[in-house]
Amino acid sequence: MSDIVLEPIARPAPIPVGEILPWAVFGGLILLLAIYFVGAEEGATSLIAGSYVHEFVHDGRHLLGFPCH
């Protein structure tokens, strides 16, 4: 056996915060929109008429613990 230790040649480069921040803000807005549709899109706060959105996210409401009926 030999005592040779191999070191990785490529090292990960740091990602500047300025490049991550716009994607983090975009992801946060999409997450807030999804939480709104799952949790509050019915009744007085409804943006879309009818119950189509409610029925589409109905199982997700129960899975996440939002009351709906």
Image: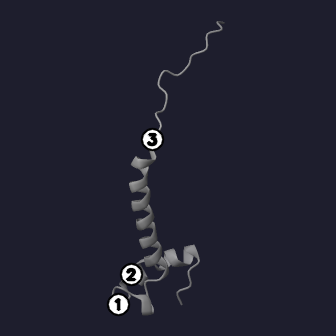
The reply to whether dot 1 and dot 2 touch (C-beta < 8 Å) is: yes
Q: Which numbered disc flags the more N-terminal residue, 2 or 3?
A: 3
Identity of the amino acid at label 3? Answer: Ile
Residue lying at 48% horizontally and 21% vertically, measured from the top left: 9
Q: Which image quadrant: the C terminus? A: bottom right
What numbered label is drawn on residue 17? none
- Quick check: 47 left or right of 64? left
* Location of residue 57 (image quadrant): bottom left
Question: Which badge, 1 or 3, is on the more N-terminal residue?
Answer: 3
Position above or below: 39 against 4: below
Residues 25 and 49: in front is 25
**Which label was assigned to residue 15?**
3
In this view, the mark in front (1 or 3): 3
Where does the image place residue 56, in percent across and percent down from the top left?
A: 40, 78
Q: Which amino acid does label 2 sit on?
A: Val
Of the pair 37 and 51, the residue shown nearer to us: 37
Report how far apart the C-alphas of labels 2 and 3 lie in the structure: 38 Å
Q: Which residue lies furthest to the left in this view?
A: 49
| Residue sitting nearer the eye, 29 or 54 | 29
- Where does the N terminus fall, quadrant-wise? top right
Which residue bears the numbered disc 1? Answer: 50
Q: Distance between the residues labelled 1 and 3?
A: 45 Å
Residue that carries the numbered disc 2 in the rendered image: 53
